[in-house]
């Protein structure tokens, strides 16, 4: 389950990229900081978590997309962080890491060139699950203060119960996708009781009030689109300012690929509009 946001646009060559180390819940984690321009401090920091179904993935998977995201504005920096994979330690290790990384950014503003004004959490697929959960944890633990959440094709339903997911098992070319999602959740949530925990399955949470504004991007022909849009509806019903967009599909670049259909151009445009709206 690739975590590449893929469509041909000009190379992001004006972005500075710095490798660094951040603090997770149990120890140091590799991270990568992206920014463009010459500003000493940027008002918006986007903390991004990669995909990989909780059991794989690293900083390289979304590298190209994050370069474009940083290049779009010199008012923002993007910090991508690793987290503990389920192959090392299952739930809740990854979500505790993700929340700890957000706390680290607040304590290390000067190191990453961030003014501290706006902190946005983001991710794709499994990383979007972590981003969504971080907003719940930040609310429940009263820190850090988040300005927004960006969820790209999020994995939110361990039960794999939505129509868009079930239809995958009826499509010979895509049956492998639902099988991979099931295997990913078995690795991440080996204890059945954890599958109902809101920090594992935000879609099941009954407490969604007082969360930061959300941008939720789904995609045509993606098995995760229904759960993404159902979560968006639940946030709206809870009074959370939420934008839900279904992006058109792009041709798959490899057999079994799925995140490639998250069209880079559409995603960047929606993210730019969402971030601008946080100022209002």
Image (cartoon, grey):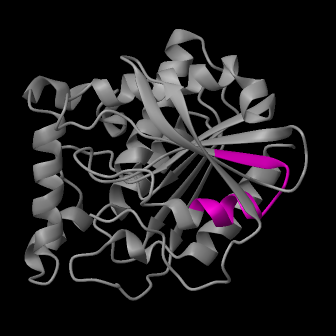
Q: As drawn, which residue projects farthest toward the bottom? A: 251
Residue at x 28%, y 66% (from the top left corner): 223
The quarter of the picture where the N terminus appears is bottom left
**Towards the viewer: 260 or 175:** 260
Q: Is 157 one of the magenta-colored residues?
A: no
In the rendered image, residue 18, in percent from the top left (x then y), is placed at 64, 47
Which residue is at the far top? 141
Is 53 situated left or right of 212 in this image?
left
Q: Give the range drawn in magenta.
A: 66-78
Task: Count how many numbered circles sit on residues in the image.
Answer: 0
Q: In terms of image quadrants, where is residue 3?
A: bottom left
Is residue 137 toward the left or the right of residue 35 in the image? left
Residue sitting farthest toward the front: 19
Left or right, 180 with respect to 51, comes to left
Residue 136 visible: no
Q: Residue at x 28, y 24 (%)?
A: 92
As drawn, 36 above or below 23: below
- Answer with left or right where residue 102 lies relative to residue 59: right
Query: Residue 41, how many percent across, how many down?
Result: 86, 37
Residue 205 shows up from this direction: yes
Q: Please tell me which residue lies in front, 201 or 97.
A: 97
Image coords of residue 230 (percent x, y): 40, 51
The image quarter containing residue 4 is bottom left
Name the image quarter holding residue 117: top right
Image location (x, y in percent) of residue 144: 63, 19
State the quadrant of the C terminus.
top right
- Which residue is at 17% across, 44% downward? 185
């Amino acid at each position: 389950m690739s975590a590449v946001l893929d469509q041909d646009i000009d190379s992001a060559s004006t972005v500075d990229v710095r490798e660094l180390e951040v603090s997770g819940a149990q120890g140091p984690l590799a991270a990568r900081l992206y920014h463009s321009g010459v500003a000493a401090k940027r008002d918006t920091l986007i903390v991004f978590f990669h995909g990989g179904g909780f059991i794989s993935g690293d900083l390289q998977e979304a590298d190209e997309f994050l370069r474009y995201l940083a290049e779009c504005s010199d008012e923002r920096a993007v910090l991508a962080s690793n987290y503990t994979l389920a192959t090392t330690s299952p739930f809740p290790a990854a979500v505790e890491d993700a929340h700890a990384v957000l706390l680290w950014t607040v304590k290390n503003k000067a190191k990453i060139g961030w003014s501290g004004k706006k902190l946005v959490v983001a991710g794709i697929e499994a990383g979007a699950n972590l981003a969504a959960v971080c907003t719940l944890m930040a609310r429940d633990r009263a820190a850090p203060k988040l300005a927004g959440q960006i969820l790209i094709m999020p994995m939110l339903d361990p039960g794999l119960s939505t129509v868009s997911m079930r239809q995958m098992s009826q499509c010979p070319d895509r049956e492998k996708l639902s099988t991979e999602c099931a295997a990913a959740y078995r690795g991440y949530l080996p204890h059945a009781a954890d599958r109902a925990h809101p920090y594992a399955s935000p879609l099941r949470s009954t407490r969604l009030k007082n969360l930061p504004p959300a941008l939720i991007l789904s995609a045509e022909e993606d098995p995760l689109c229904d759960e993404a849009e159902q979560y968006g509806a639940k946030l709206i019903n809870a009074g959370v300012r939420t934008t839900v967009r279904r992006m058109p599909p792009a041709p798959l670049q490899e057999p079994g690929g799925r995140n490639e259909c998250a069209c880079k151009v559409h995603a960047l445009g929606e993210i730019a509009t969402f971030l601008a709206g946080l100022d209002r």
